[in-house]
């Protein structure tokens, strides 16, 4: 897909690994550095030397330098960070959709550790963690000034161990402690259902290594059961993202042509474009995509591709707005630099980052009076509105 579709490229935590051209670090770059940079580097070494020699307690230079690196990168955005060898190793374990932890995607919003979305059917999801919850403590320790990598390290752990997070939730006056028992997270990314009157439903919970294969299999099973297929609902709510190639392949499964997603950055090599191909078996039925504030990253790419190519109507709430590309650059001694290098754009040129995907039909979620009844999909007012839209062209329960 013109440079975008490379195995291992990610857009949510964990993120992407790319090769950087040697010229990026060449002599031309060094020779063009402003002399003020060298003056500031001299200032840094002077301060470091003074701290090592005069601080009240003996200190080691390594944690000081790592702290300085994280402080520097934190001024850029929440996603750029320095990774120690241990952090870099942990970052690589997520791509298969199986790891020990609680099952949430997190970010920093105005320097506050915030839940993007809980992953469906994981310990955090079952414990009641919700999108937009602010995590102010982990095991009683404040998360003020914490980095995402540090938070991930604290939340992840062996199966069966417990972690307590203290959250602040909108409209709740007091903090809430939620105790979560860690488990091996095995993400089942695709679920399906067939409704009466020939309508299909596909839930995409995240984008893992087999998501596109499982989606194509699910589509085939639905089309065998339902003839003709009158309409299809793709549910991307609370989908925190995952692998970029999977987002491209999922989009391509519904598009015969058109741009899926493009990236633009300062370095020329980061300007890329993924284009759909006609496979001859794309479903022709009308499509409604369900989004909410917990839909991020890869989920936003799929929604933006289908909306931008006028292949689907987006229903629900504005998505999270995580549309930047992070590149993992390996460094010495197993360390790495995670650096934001580009932004994602929809087919019509809109930046996803910060803005999210705006639904064509805004429908606010209404919580069922009896929470146990949420297993009945048709008690979900947004899903019911999507079905109504496919049947009549108008959504019920519009708010």
Image: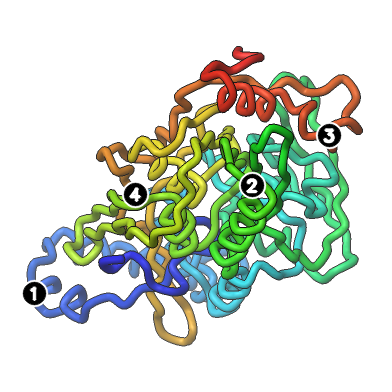
In this image, 332 relative to 99: left or right? left
Where does label 1 land, which residue? 28
Where does label 4 land, which residue? 344
**262 in relation to 334, above or below:** above
Nearest to the observer: residue 229 or residue 208: 229
Q: Count neighbours of disc 2 (C-alpha within 10 A) and say few if under 14, some if 14 to 19, many if 20 or more.
A: many
Mark seen at residue 95: none
**314 in relation to 253, above or below:** above
**Residues at marks 2 and 4 touching, judged by CB atoms closer than 8 Å:** no
Of circles 2 and 1, which is in front? 2
Q: Which of the marked residues, 4 or 1, is nearer the chain's N terminus?
A: 1
Q: Count neighbours of disc 3 (C-alpha within 10 A) and say few if under 14, some if 14 to 19, many if 20 or more.
A: few
Of circles 2 and 4, which is in front? 2
Question: Residue, x 72% and y 37% (percent of image)?
Answer: 195
| Figure label count | 4
Where does label 3 land, which residue? 376
**247 in relation to 226, above or below:** below
Q: Count neighbours of disc 4 (C-alpha within 10 A) and say few if under 14, some if 14 to 19, many if 20 or more.
A: many
Disc 2 versus disc 4: distance between alpha carbons?
A: 25 Å
Mark seen at residue 202: 2
Q: Which of the marked residues, 2 or 1, is nearer the chain's N terminus?
A: 1
Q: Which of the marked residues, 3 or 2, is nearer the chain's N terminus?
A: 2
Question: Residue, x 58% and y 42% (percent of image)?
Answer: 228
Disc 1 versus disc 3: distance between alpha carbons?
A: 62 Å
Q: Which of the marked residues, 1 or 3, is nearer the chain's N terminus?
A: 1
In this image, 275 relative to 241: left or right? left
In this image, 110 relative to 379: left or right? left
């Amino acid at each position: 897909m013109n440079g975008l579709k490379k195995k291992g490229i990610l857009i949510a935590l964990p993120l992407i690994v790319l090769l950087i051209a040697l010229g990026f670090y060449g002599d031309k770059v060094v020779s063009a550095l402003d002399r003020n940079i060298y003056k500031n580097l001299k200032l840094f070494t002077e301060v470091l030397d003074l701290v090592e020699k005069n601080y009240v307690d003996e200190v080691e230079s390594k944690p000081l330098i790592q702290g300085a690196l994280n402080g520097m990168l934190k001024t850029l955005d929440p996603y750029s960070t320095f990774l120690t060898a241990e952090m870099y190793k942990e970052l690589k374990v997520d791509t298969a959709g199986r790891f020990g932890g609680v099952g949430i995607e997190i970010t920093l919003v105005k320097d506050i550790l915030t839940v993007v979305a809980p992953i469906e059917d994981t310990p955090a999801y079952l414990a009641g963690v919700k999108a937009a919850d602010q995590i102010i403590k982990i095991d009683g320790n404040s998360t003020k000034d914490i980095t995402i990598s540090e938070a991930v390290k604290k939340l992840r752990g062996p199966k069966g161990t417990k972690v307590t997070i203290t959250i602040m939730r909108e409209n709740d006056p007091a903090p809430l402690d939620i105790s979560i028992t860690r488990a091996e997270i095995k993400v089942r990314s695709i679920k399906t259902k067939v409704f009466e009157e020939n309508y299909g439903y596909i839930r995409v919970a995240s984008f893992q290594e087999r998501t596109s294969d499982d989606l194509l299999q699910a589509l085939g099973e639905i089309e065998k059961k339902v003839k003709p297929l009158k309409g299809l609902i793709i549910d991307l709510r609370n989908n925190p993202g995952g692998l970029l190639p999977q987002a491209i392949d999922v989009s391509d499964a519904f598009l015969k042509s058109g741009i899926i997603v493009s990236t633009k950055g300062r370095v020329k090599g980061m300007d890329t474009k993924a284009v759909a191909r006609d496979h001859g078996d794309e479903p022709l039925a009308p499509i409604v995509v369900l989004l909410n504030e917990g839909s991020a990253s890869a989920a936003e790419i799929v929604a933006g591709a289908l909306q931008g190519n006028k292949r689907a109507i987006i229903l629900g709430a504005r998505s999270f707005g995580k549309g930047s590309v992070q590149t993992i650059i390996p460094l010495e001694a197993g360390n790495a630099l995670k650096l934001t290098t580009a932004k994602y754009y929809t087919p019509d040129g809109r930046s996803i980052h910060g803005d999210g995907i705006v639904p064509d039909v805004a429908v606010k979620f209404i919580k069922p009076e009896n929470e146990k009844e949420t297993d009945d999909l048709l008690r979900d007012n947004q899903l019911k509105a999507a079905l109504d839209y496919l049947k009549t062209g108008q959504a019920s329960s519009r708010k």
